[in-house]
Amino acid sequence: MTDYDIHIKNGTIVDGTRAPKYHGDLWIKDGRIAQMGGRAKGTSEQIIDADGAIVAPGFVDLHTHYDAQIYWDPWCSISSWHGVTSAVLGNCGFGFAPCKPDFRDRSMLTMVRTEAIPYESMKEGMLPAWDWETIPEYLDTIDRLPKGINVLQYMPTASLMIYVMGLDAAKSRPATSAEQKEMQRLLHEGMDAGLCGFSIQRLGPNSTQADFDGSPMVTDTMCDDDIFCLAEVLRERDEGFIQLTQATSSNPNDPDDLAFKRRLAEVAGRPIIDNVVPVSQKNPRVHEERLEWLAQANADGLRIFGQAAQLRTGFAFSLDTWNLYDSSPAWREATTGTLEEKIVKLRDPAIRERIKAETDAASTLFTQTQGAVGGPPRKLIVQGVARRQDMQQYVGKSLERIAEEEGKHYLDVMLDLSLQTDLRTEFLGEGPEFNVEHMAGVLTESPYTVPGVSDGGAHTKFFNGGAWPTDMLTWMVRDTGRITLEEAHYKMSALAAHAGGFVDRGVLREGAAADVVVYKLDELAIDPPWIGEPVYDLPGGEWRRIQRAEGYHSIIVNGVETFADGECTGATPGSLLRHGRG
């Protein structure tokens, strides 16, 4: 009989605590780390030679939308390919529970728009397994699913409000006292069953991520008191945390928005994950001001963590499915509805003039933090024309250049080319030249910031946020030396686990859960780089963009290898972490 399940030998151990890396061995038994360092006290069933490789805790992603994908993809790729071993579902207030049976279809349609998850994929991949109404029933279903990673689950606040108030009421008025009490009761019930807290997106009436009909999401216009009533549940229980996406003005450091976050932290008495720390590639004061605010909030006893979106990525999109210009009323109106309805509206001269006016004026849409949604539309590159041979002369040119050549407004160019291909002309927004000093500075200049915001499972036709761990290690650690290896792993694993309420995860220590990555830093790469490649691997014949990972020798979840040299082993040892515990 063997004494250990896995022996990882000859590796360079980075344990996630910020302790200096060291050369040593690690042994795993029954899903936990049994021994670190020294000599083996018995034999092992499996030996992984980590000579020349880093051995570190698996990465923790606090912001994903794998709520649908987990039903057909137990490993929640692409995140798992890039070393993520634990993720939090139900971000931004969106999800599928609680949900009455007659609202299932509308619930899926919401996710089609706001998170750009294909309807046919949900209908074929998730709907057959839909056997829940309440949060406890939903968690039991998640628990039974085969999982290749560990997951925590928020209470999706939009789903909760709709369940209690009905869709129309939830979008048009505050909750009554009786409705608040029922929402509190249901949050208590969900927390009893294992939820980690609740999540909210509050982006105002012109939300960047609107609902299926173009109206704001329920939580976008949610009043303060309805949020505070849920925060009171966490205070009463003294457990859980809140994920908040809020930016209701053109100023990412708006004093009113920041004051609300402080008040929410005071009412809840629990940690808040603030999405996201804004970054300007040119002006360091944009992120520095937010870091100063975080420092003051924590000095005042408020536990608020800022989350950073530090991935270098662009956007590729076509107007048949695009939704990330939704904070422009004209764009939102034009891109809402069926394909046929969109085509009619994009031909309408009056709507076009409104689009031009709003695009020219709305600097927050296209030029704010990190070159939002691919930068100004005039710089978009025509990447594809739906295989139209008579349009190949446009491929590789910017809208601005085509506009100059043809004497047209660049938005007329964009819309005319789109209409010629039934809105399938593809545009590439490469964004700015990313400033490593500013983007890494968000992490190194504050003890209260964590990386991530992958949006994994969402917007998969547009970009790949799930590759962020590999990009961070290659760009910020290996290629520029802007972050030390020890600091990177502390931020990606230990601090993220701490902020998100994970128990016994995020570090390598004896007795901790055995979530481990083994990789060679000099071999790490994202393939293909930038925006990935389209593959038709979703249910319902749908496609997404993917970026594979290179350089990961082994990925281990709960003591079982899920990926070996980039290939999935087929093992599904992941757990639903009720209350943060396996």
Image (cartoon, rainbow, N blue to C red):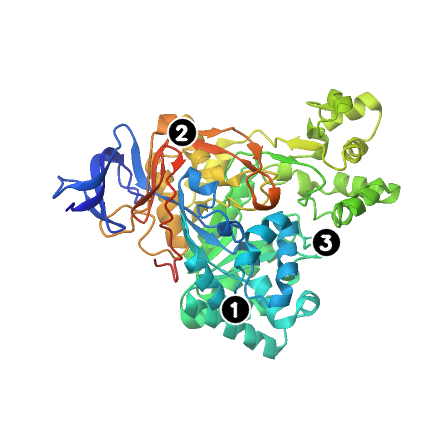
- Where residue 197 appears, as percent x and y from the top left, is 47, 62
User: Which residue occupies 36% across, 29% down?
Assistant: 521
Could you tell me if the residues under marks 1 and 2 are in contact, i.e. CB atoms within 8 Å?
no
Could you tell me if the residues under marks 3 and 2 are in contact, i.e. CB atoms within 8 Å?
no
Could you tell me if the residues under marks 1 and 3 are in contact, i.e. CB atoms within 8 Å?
no
Task: Give the quarter of the image for residue 278.
Answer: top right
Q: Nearer the viewer, residue 269 or 211?
A: 211
Crowding at mark 2 (Cα within 10 Å: few <14, some 14-19, many 20+): some
268 to 274, vertically: above or below: below
Amino acid at the residue labelled 3:
Gly
Sequence-first disc among 1 and 2: 1
Sequence-first disc among 1 and 3: 1
- Looking at the rendered image, the quarter that the C terminus falls into is bottom left
Tell me the SS state at disc 3: loop
Task: Give the quarter of the image for residue 280.
Answer: top right
- Where residue 142 appears, as percent x and y from the top left, is 45, 58
User: Which residue occupies 75% across, 50% down?
Assistant: 337
Tell me the SS state at disc 2: loop
Residue 214: image tag: 3
Residue 524: image tag: 2
How far apart, in angstroms, are the residues tagged by discs 1 and 2? 42 Å
- Where residue 545 appears, as percent x and y from the top left, is 57, 36
Q: Is residue 551 left or right of residue 407?
A: left
Amino acid at the residue labelled 2:
Leu
Residue 134: image tag: 1
